Image (cartoon, helix red, strand yellow):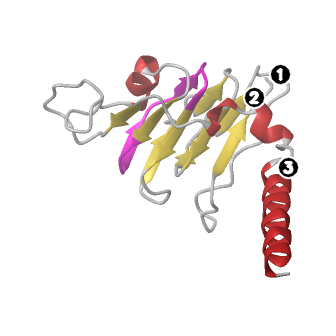
């Protein structure tokens, strides 16, 4: 009798564990290539004014654009706290992560869109984005082509929101 109960319990355990592991993946898990760990992390720090600049933790690039230029598909570009006065163009599948949203700032100096994304599966997180240009089509983050224009990112004068978005299917 005890053997029968034990056998039933083992079968029940195996049956329930098989069901949970056989559950279908969500479309996001199947279609989103960034679920894999980053192939490589490239570092950026505006405080590295002496060089050398090779994108390593010890010798980070000085600009976000340099980090993106050196990145390949599925790489992460990690940006240390600081104010980066540049506009950024992302044309490949990468993660762009700032160290802290309130103190990792991309300032476009009123020169067009601050970040322009033309690549698929771009993940942006941990930045304050400010000072895009004042013309139609300029935005904090512009996705795809300039027509139609993308909406502006919320003003930095408001309470900062958590900005972590994935841009896909451009």
Vertical position of residue 132 compared to residue 160: above or below = above
Q: Position of residue 46 (x, y in %)?
A: 29, 39
Q: What residue do we see at 49% from left, 19% from top?
A: 72
- Residue highlighted by disc 3: 23
Residue holding disc 2:
137
Seen from the viewer's position, the closer of residues 94 and 13 is 13
Q: How many marks?
A: 3
**Vertical position of residue 70 compared to residue 35: above or below:** above
> In the orientation shown, which residue stands out farthest toward the front?
1
> Residue 136, percent across and down?
76, 30
Q: What residue sits 21% from the left and 37% below the top?
A: 48
| Mark seen at residue 147 | 1
> Cβ–Cβ below 8 Å for labels 2 and 1?
yes
Q: Is residue 85 magenta?
A: yes
Q: CA distance from mark 3 to mark 2?
A: 44 Å
Lower sequence index among marks 3 and 1: 3
Which circle's residue, 3 or 2, is located before the other in the chain? 3
Task: Check the picture and name the quadrant holding the C terminus.
Answer: top right
Q: Magenta span covers which residues?
A: 79-94
Q: Residues within 10 Å of mark 2 (few under 14, many from 20)?
A: some
Choose between 123 and 15: the one closer to the eye. Answer: 15
Residue 116 image-quadrant placement: top right
88 within the magenta span: yes
Secondary structure beneath dot 1 equals loop
The quadrant of the image that shows the N terminus is bottom right
Quarter of the figure with residue 111: top right
- Mark 3: give few (<14), some (14-19) or many (20+) Cα within 10 Å: few
Residue 56 is marked as: none
Q: Residue furthest left?
A: 50
State the SS at label 3. loop
Q: Is residue 97 left or right of residue 113?
A: left
Identify the secondary structure beneath mark 2. Answer: loop
């Amino acid at each position: 009798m005890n053997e029968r109960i034990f056998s039933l319990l083992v079968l029940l355990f195996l049956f329930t564990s098989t069901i949970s592991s056989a559950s279908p993946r969500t479309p996001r898990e199947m279609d989103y290539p960034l679920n894999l760990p980053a192939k490589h992390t490239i570092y950026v720090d505006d405080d590295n004014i002496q060089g050398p600049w090779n994108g390593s933790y010890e010798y980070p690039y000085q600009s976000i654009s340099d980090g993106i230029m050196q990145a390949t598909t599925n790489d992460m570009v990690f940006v240390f706290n600081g104010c980066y006065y540049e506009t950024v163009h992302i044309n490949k599948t990468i993660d762009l992560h700032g160290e802290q949203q309130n103190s990792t700032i991309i300032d476009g100096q009123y020169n067009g869109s601050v970040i322009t994304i033309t690549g698929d599966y771009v993940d942006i997180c941990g930045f304050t984005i400010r000072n895009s240009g004042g013309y139609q089509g300029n935005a904090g983050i512009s996705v795809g082509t300039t027509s139609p224009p993308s909406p502006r990112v919320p003003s930095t004068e408001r309470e900062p929101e958590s900005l972590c978005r994935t841009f896909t299917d451009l």
